[in-house]
Amino acid sequence: MKSFSLNELLDLLASPDPHLRDDIAYSQLASRIESGTEDRHLRELGDRLILQLNDEAIQTRSFSALVLGCVVERSVHIDQLDRETLRQWLELFAAWYRTETDLRGWDEEFGWLHAVAHGADVIATFAQVPELEEENLVTLLSLVAARLLTPTMWVFKEQEEERLGRAAGIVLLRSELTRSAATSWLEPIALAFSKSEPGPTPPWASNTMRTLRVIYMIVDRGLRDGNASEFRKTPLRKDVESAIADVLQLASPYTTQL
């Protein structure tokens, strides 16, 4: 296989060819970052990927986000980047994710685009950064809610709700969250459901209901770290389950009637 430079691989994230973008660019970048080959360039690499979140092409934005998650994970693992840099990256990533409008999962021509799923994976990575404080974790949960509530024509069909639900579940594992912080992100969702009118279910509502059900299951059962046999449980499991159930009842009257 041809050896590409770092800049060449970053450029290939914009390729409309799914083989060049996914099988070569993303795979090689992820491998090089995980192995430590790019440890000297993590700050510059992260800054470049943040800039590419503003690219005109959806594949560039989505795959730049996915690689950014690799950079954040490696940076935390080797304790290389300062807290302020990570927070800046989170802020700029969040600005892209909450406003992305192209939510295609699989495209016959471009292959995987998957902005929702890729962004969810980045949230999951940030959620495991030890330096993040409660306010940052609340930002992550609010970002999940904002992503769900943004009007869209796209209905999740490529397990986007699974990836987004997992991301929220990982945030909710953090012991720094108070009861209010762990549940207040659901308030705008409850408000949106309470204002819904009879008629066909809009895509955002379908996406939100399904994602909340995934989060409920994760909170109830817990998450495993790799191949570990033990499940990590949400510290405020009962409070979060109750809050999610209350919100779902607003949109699911059939679950409470004979």
Image (spheres, rainbow, N blue to C red):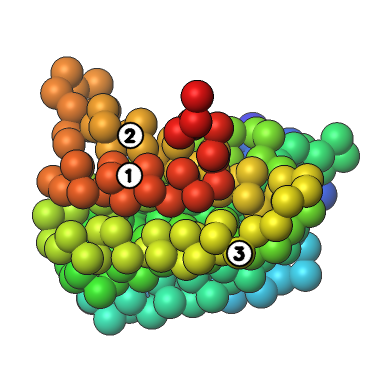
Residue 125 placement (x, y as % from top left): 35, 52
Task: List the single residue furthest toward the front.
Answer: 258
SS class of the residue under badge 2? helix
Identity, as a three-letter code, of the amino acid under mark 1:
Gly
Q: CA distance from mark 2 to mark 3?
A: 27 Å
Which of the pair 245/116 is nearer the observer?
245
Mark 2 or 1, nearer chain start = 1
Indicate the quadrant where residue 232 lies. Answer: top left
Labels 2 & 1 near each other (Cβ < 8 A) = yes
Identity, as a three-letter code, of the amino acid under mark 2:
Ile
Labels 1 & 3 near each other (Cβ < 8 A) = no
SS class of the residue under badge 3? loop
Relative vertical location of residue 198 with respect to residue 232 in this rendering, above or below: below
212 left or right, relative to 236: right
Q: Which residue is mark 2?
A: 218
Q: Which residue is mark 3?
A: 195
Residue 118 placement (x, y as % from top left): 55, 49
Q: Which residue is mark 1?
A: 169
Q: Residue at x 61, y 64 (%)?
A: 195
Q: Residue at x 33, y 34 (%)?
A: 218
Residue 147 placement (x, y as % from top left): 56, 60
Front label number (2 vs 3) = 3
Residue 151 placement (x, y as % from top left): 70, 63
Mark 2 or 3, nearer chain start = 3
Which of the pair 193/10 is nearer the observer?
193
Q: Which mark is residue 212?
A: none
Q: Residue at x 52, y 55 (%)?
A: 119
